[in-house]
Image: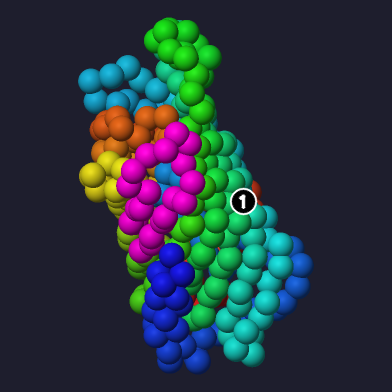
Amino acid sequence: MAKRISFCWVILLFLSCGQGTAKADYGQGSFPPAHELFLPLQADPSEPRFGVSYGAPISQHAIAIANIGDYLGLYRWSILNGKGAVQLNIGGAIFSRFDFTGSHDLQVIDYYGNVPLDIKIGSVSARLMFYHDSSHLGDDYLRNKGLVSESHSWEAWRSMLSYQPIKPLRIYAGYSDAFHTKPGWTGPQAVQGGAEVYFNPEGHGHWYLYWANDVQSWHRDAWNPTWTSQLGLKSSAEGAQGRGISYFVQYMTGPRLEGQFFPNHESIWLIGLKFDISQHAPVPSPTGN
């Protein structure tokens, strides 16, 4: 794992060469904005956020998803005379999925926590973090299926690298390695990649149309990928500092990412809302502004 982290930093330094014209002037101090250095990944289902959505899995009954989560910036160190920064955050989320039927039974709930270390130099950002995921089946689901509750959890290291060659485009890639799982399962490694396209990066009219794509592939699922494609429209008022509401439609197919269901494959359409309540840039910025 140490070799992979070192490789990530080497790539970061390589891509950030020539970023001396960056306009950002990062300060240093406690409790900085959590999303300024590494903006949340729009189409990553495991990204902590506030949101609700309605889904229609193909050949199954409808479901509803409710997520609660965000990050808190703890401390930021300014580097390269203010042209770059390193920041320590903490994050947490609750991901829940319900049957959207008369019963509204809870299927599964995942509790997620992480400690990210973010770095940004010019148009390049990196995130290195520890995270924990604990997955639990709902009581109604257990009763209806005649199952006995079994705890599923894991701890992992995750590294992400994000590059923004032009303002409307962001690409990223990452690697995860679970070092402790309960119950034990083989194949703890995962790879991830994606791209986000912003059609109104200057925010004319205070709306931001985006198209985000994410793919995650775990060794535990024989490297079968989970593809997520999300088309969304974010609205944000003047002076809101990036806070706003995103309306989206999404298609996802592949192995499920909840710990209790990762052997299961599904294809699902979703429509939903995401609520950005923390201060951050409405869209990623190569210069940090």
Mark yes or no: residue 53 visible: no
- Residue 220's spot in the image, x, y percent? 31, 43
Disc 1: CA contacts within 10 A as few (<14), some (14-19) or many (>=20) = some
- Is 175 covered by the magenta stretch? yes
Tell me which residue sits at (50%, 11%) in the image. 140
Mark yes or no: residue 222 visible: yes
- Up the image or down, 260 lies above or below 7; here it is above
Q: Nearer the viewer, residue 211 or 236?
A: 211
- Residue 44's spot in the image, x, y percent? 41, 49
- Residue 214's spot in the image, x, y percent? 33, 52
- Up the image or down, 249 lies above or below 144; here it is below
Q: Amino acid at mark 1?
A: Gly
Tell me which residue sits at (32%, 17%) in the image. 61
- Up the image or down, 106 lies above or below 111; here it is above
Q: Which residue is mark 1?
A: 91
Q: Nearer the viewer, residue 33 or 157?
A: 157
- Is 244 covered by the magenta stretch? no
Q: Nearer the viewer, residue 43 or 215?
A: 215
Tell me which residue sits at (42%, 8%) in the image. 146
| Quadrant of the drawing holding the N terminus | bottom left
Determine whether the residue tagged by mark 1 lies in a helix, strand or loop.
Answer: strand
User: Over which residues does the magenta segment extend?
Assistant: 173-192
Tell me which residue sits at (54%, 60%) in the image. 129
- Residue 224's spot in the image, x, y percent? 23, 44
Q: Main secondary structure of the magenta part?
A: strand
